[in-house]
Image (spheres, rainbow, N blue to C red):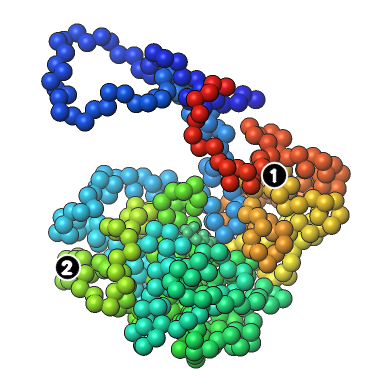
Amino acid sequence: MIREPLIFEISDPGKKGYSIPKLDVPADPSALEGLPLRADIPDFPQVSEVEVVRHFTRLSQQNYCVDLGLYPLGSCTMKYNPKVNDRIASFPAFADTHPLAPAGMVQGNLEILHRMEKLLSEITGFDAFTLQPSAGAQGELVGIMLVRAYHESKGIPRRYVLIPDSAHGTNPSSAHLSGYEVKEIKSNASGRIDPAVLEQAMTDEVAALMVTNPNTLGVFESDICLIAEIVHAKGGLLYMDGANMNALAGVARPGDFGVDVLHLNLHKTFSTPHGGGGPGSGPVGVKKILEPFLPVPVVAKKGEAYALDFDRPASIGRVRSFFGNYLVVLKAMAYILSLGPKGVREMAEIAVLNANYIRKGLEGVYDLQYDTASMHEVVFSDKIQKEAYGITNLDIAKRLIDHGFHPPTMSFPLIVHGALMIEPTETESRRDLDLFIEAMRTIAREAAENPAVLKEAPHHTYVRRLDETAAARNPIVAWDGRKA
Ligand SMILES: *Cc1c(COP(=O)(O)O)cnc(C)c1O
C-alpha cells in the first residue's frame, strides 16, 4: 500500500499545475496596479496538474463516507441525505443572497424561515421556533438561557438543573455555562428515569429537568407525562434534547407530552450529515410562556410582508450572526416537504424498525445491558467477548473497519461499560443491514477462534492502530520542511 506523502513532500521548485500558451499580446502590468497581490506564498507546493489530481483523489479514497456504506455511529444519525436537498441549497438565489440585504429585498428568503418555523412547530407541537443556533449544543445553551430568563422574570433564576446519567455530555455543559449547578438523576434497571427518584430530587430550587427522549440508550421515556407533571408541580420547566427526533417525528410530539422547550438537530434528523465539522443547525422550539424571551430578530409576518422584529424587550438577545446556517435550514425544509406528513412518519417508523432488526440479529451474540425494545438505536456492550477472550469494544470496532464498515459510537453512554452504540438510521436497505449483522457475527466468531486478529486490527487500512491519546494530545498539524 502506498503511503501518501504530504503535498509539500512531493513539491519540486519550478513545477506548475497548469499549462497555457505564452502571452501573444503586449503585457499590461498597470492592470494589476494597486491590487493587494502577494509577491510570494511561503512553502507553496509546486506540483504538476496530474500530481495534484492524484494526490487528492488518493486521499479521498482513503476516506469512509455515507455515500460508501453504513455509518452506524449511534446518536449521530449518519444517514444518507438525498442529493436534491444539496442541489436546492446551491441555487444562486439562496447561496448568493447577501446576509445584510434589507428585508424588503429578501422577502422570499424570510418567507422560507417563517414557513420552516411553522413546519417544525407542527412536527414537534410547539408555539414558536428560533432557527439561529448553529449546532445541537448551541441549541441547548439557548434553551437553558430561555429557562433562566423565564425564572428571572418570576423573581429568581433558581439554582439547579437535573440531568439523567445517560445524557449526552453537552447537556451538563450547557447547564453549567448558563450558570446552573448540575444534579445527576440515576437511571433505573430499564435505563429510564425513575419518577420516584425524580420526585425526591425535584425541589423549588430546580430550574429545569433536561431529558433526552428517546434517551441515548435508544429507550423511550414512557413515564414522560408523569415526569412533566412532577417537574411542573414544583414550578420547574421540562427541557428536551431532541437530537434523536428521527425516532419520533410524525408519531409523537414533545409539545403534547409536557415539554416546554426543545432543541432539534436538523443536521441529523432532517438532512445534512452530522460530523466532519460541517455546518449544523440546532433550532429551539418553545411553548407560549417562553416565546417573549426568544433571540432577536424574530421573523414576523405583517400582512403579506415579512419583517425582522428587533423590538422584543424580554429577549435574551442575538445568539448567532445573521440567520443561523441558512442553507442547512433550507436543506431540512426541502427534505420535510419532499417527504410530506406521511413520509416524515415513515422515516421514524423505519429508523425504529431498522434498529430493532439489528438488535434481533445480534441478540445473544453481543451483550445487551437493558432488556427494553429499541427506538432508533441499540446499545450493545463487549461484556461477552471481554469476559471470555479479553476482547474489548475497541478491538471489535477496529475489526469492523476490515469488514468494510465504519465503527459504531463507542464507550457512550457512560452507564454502559464497553458500549457499542449502533444507529443504522432509516436509509439503510435490508441487504445492507444483513451485511452489517453478518460482519458483526463474524467478528464474534473471530473473537473466539483467533483473538489476535482482532487485537491487531485493522489490517487493511492505510494506517493501523494509532495511539489515540498521543494523537489527540500531540497532533502534528504543521509540516516541518523535511522530505520523506
Ligand atoms: C449530537 C447530539 C447533541 C449535540 O449536537 P451537536 O450538533 O453535535 O452540537 C446533543 N445531544 C444529543 C443526544 C446528540 O446526539
Q: Quadrant of the N terminus?
A: top right
346 lies above or below 175: above
Asked where in the image residue 386 lies, by quadrant, the reply is: bottom right
Q: Quadrant of the C terminus?
A: top right
On the image, the x and y values in percent for residue 153 come to 34, 84
Q: Tell which residue pokes out farthest to the bottom in this image.
A: 233
Secondary structure of the residue carrying tag 2 is loop
Q: Nearer the viewer, residue 263 or 151?
A: 151
Q: Amino acid at mark 1?
A: Lys
96 vs 77, left or right, is: left
Q: Residue at (62%, 61%) from the top-left corner?
A: 377
How many marks the image carries: the answer is 2
Q: Residue at (34%, 67%) from the top-left corner?
A: 130
Q: Residue at (51%, 29%) from the top-left corner?
A: 480
Q: Amino acid at mark 2?
A: Glu
Alpha-carbon span between mark 1 and mark 2: 57 Å
Q: Residue at (69%, 75%) from the top-left corner?
A: 190
14 lies above or below 206: above
Question: Which label was assigned to residue 398?
Answer: 1
Asked if one can make out residue 342 in the rendered structure from this viewpoint, the answer is no
Name the residue carrying label 2: 304
Q: Bin the neighbour count of mark 1 within 10 Å (Cα to Cα): few under 14, some 14-19, many 20 and up.
A: many
On the image, the x and y values in percent for residue 252 come to 50, 74
Q: Bin the neighbour count of mark 2 within 10 Å (Cα to Cα): few under 14, some 14-19, many 20 and up.
A: few
225 lies above or below 438: below
Which of disc 2 and disc 1 is earlier in sequence? 2
